[in-house]
Image: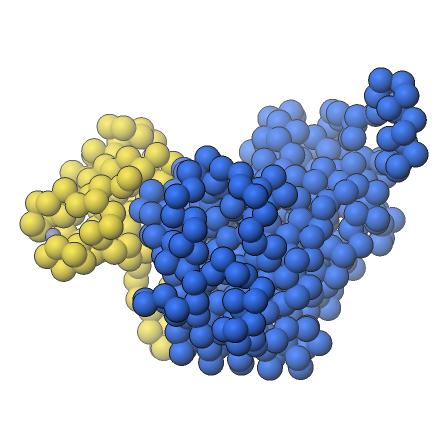
Amino acid sequence: MLTLKCPYCGVQAEETELHAGGEAHLTRFGPDSSDDDFETYLFTRENPKGVHFERWRHSHGCGKWFHAARCTMTLEVFGTYPAQTTEPPQDIRDAITAKRPGWTWREFS
Amino acid sequence: MTRYSAFAIAREALRDHAGWDRAWRRATPKKRYDVVIVGAGGHGLATAYYLGKNFGITNVAVLEKGWLGGGNTGRNTTIIRSNYLQDPSAAIYEKARSLYETMSQDLNYNVMFSPRGVMMLAQTEHEVRGYKRTAHANSLQGVTTEFISPKRVKQLVPIMNIDGPRYPVLGALWQARGGTARHDAVAWGYARACSAMGMDIIQKCEVTGVMSEGGRVSGVATTQGDIACDKLGMVVAGHSGALAEMAGFRIPIESVALQALVSEPIKPCMDVVVMANTVHGYMSQSDKGEMVIGGGTDAFNNYTQRGSFHHIEETVRALVETFPMISRLKMLRQWGGIVDVTGDRSPILSRTPLEGCFINCGWGTGGFKAIPGSGWGFAELMARGHSPLTDAFSLDRFREGRFIDESVAAGVAH
Ligand SMILES: Cc1cc2nc3c(=O)[nH]c(=O)nc-3n(C[C@H](O)[C@H](O)[C@H](O)COP(=O)(O)OP(=O)(O)OC[C@H]3O[C@@H](n4cnc5c(N)ncnc54)[C@H](O)[C@@H]3O)c2cc1C
Ligand SMILES: [Zn+2]
């Protein structure tokens, strides 16, 4: 079973307490954007075997959205961090590098 | 290849079964093929079979990283139906269902197709309206389904409690010609027929890279060396994202775990397939007597081929209200498969940005039923460049907003 630590209330929540919100750090392109950007934003998703970044909501707890860095092959969690950021913070990236040297995800590494 | 027949069984019975051949040849890769198919699941093997049978293309290799049928084809709950809502879906699933009717004869391999009837329970007013709409759509599409009353449901499935307090049965969408088949046999039957046409089925051969020249596919790198090809078909279900990345394009697919479980065997008690989509549970009884139960998918991407326990708990808890007699059954086994889910819950059968490379994926939680229809259409697409069965399922439908929206009909769609 997957458990994630809510970065706001500090609870180590198990998956039935949480709501999965899909891929993290999407740029939400609007009607004036190019067809490519709009299509990619709406439909194309990262689907990596390994390091992945996602949005989660502590829906049966404090109710807030947050981010998680996780391995899709093992359910190992590298860390969680607040929602108010457009990219993974350095300490999370370092934590991943310690366990998965050479990882990449979109433009991040 | 020895033909299987009653006569052959009698003959072999008299000589200690010493005369049976291997069902398919063990092959080592050649340097080059006209067509390479990646993935020896049902869809990949059916594609190879119809390339040979319908188009005479037999210089074909099917490459499989594990063992044949070891992906979702050997992990599903084998429900076959074609009562979808949208026209392109009805066309391909009904083609598949009709091919299942003659598959054992066609392949000379008993796939145990059992058209026992599939019943989709309506347990909310919303579902009643939805299924009536589907029944009307199906009659326009030439797919025989009907909306039946709770009384008829009870006649067909006497073990069902139709007056549950939380999930009363208000009716059902009934497809009498739907049913089940033996999943492994489907893979094995196609593999045997492909091998008999001279195709190579190569197991333990993982594709690790896609090679191209001037925007056109030229071959694949594998754990058994490089293999050149004119055309490449990627048919790898949950692993499609990884294959697409090797070929340099992206697809709108996310991979999640879906699980199923079976009970200890009991005497025959239910001779149809029942699906209860409101509670994300469905059940049928296997020939061995086990109750085969499936549920919902995990909500987050993963490749663990296991699935979260609470889904099983929810599924079984909900089914117990409708089938009180299963409350004392012991469960024997549970397993998971990685399913490839698209935004509109419809598959992708398409050309790709890489010339000569085609992709067949996105069957998600419900592609076993589609195997022969998908193979038929995808073979035509690969041989001719387009197919009436697959054209609507192209990759550019997302960009163009031409969705084939089946998610409205049911969150689970096995
Ligand atoms: C628990 C469960 C229940 C289901 N129930 C139903 C049901 O009742 N009815 C229904 O219609 N559908 C059902 N499905 C869905 C159905 O099983 C799938 O849609 C279908 O089997 C997909 O077949 P496939 O040939 O595309 O994929 P698979 O059978 O998964 O085959 C893909 C193959 O590609 C191979 N592969 C992957 N990567 C590589 C590589 N790099 N190189 C070489 N080979 C590779 C894999 O090893 C695999 O064998 C269910 C699925 C699950 C998991
Ligand atoms: Zn919280």
Q: How is the image coloured?
A: by chain
Which quadrant is home to the N terminus of chain B?
top right
Which hue belongs to chain A? yellow
Q: Is residue B84 above or below residue A59?
A: below
Q: Is residue B51 above or below residue A103?
A: below
Q: Residue at x 73, y 55 (%)?
A: B100
The chain assigned the colour blue in the figure is B
Please state if B332 lies on the left or on the right of B373 as rendered.
left
Q: Percent from the top left, x then y, of residue B39?
A: 63, 40
Q: Residue at x 8, y 45 (%)?
A: A10
Please state if B35 lies on the left or on the right of A10 as rendered.
right
Q: Residue at x 64, y 52 (%)?
A: B180
Q: Percent from the top left, x then y, of residue B30?
A: 77, 29
Specify whether residue B294 is in view: yes
- Along the line of sight, which residue is nearer the eye, B340 or B110? B110
Quarter of the view holding residue B167: bottom left
Q: Residue at x 65, y 34 (%)?
A: B68
Specify whether residue B72 is in view: no
- Along the line of sight, which residue is nearer the eye, B64 or A3? A3
- Along the line of sight, which residue is nearer the eye, B307 or B236? B307
Q: Percent from the top left, x then y, of residue B235?
A: 62, 47
Q: How many marks?
A: 0
- Along the line of sight, which residue is nearer the eye, B304 or A98? B304
Q: Is residue B42 above or below residue B154?
A: above
Q: Percent from the top left, x then y, of residue B10?
A: 90, 29
Please state if B302 lies on the left or on the right of A67 as rendered.
right
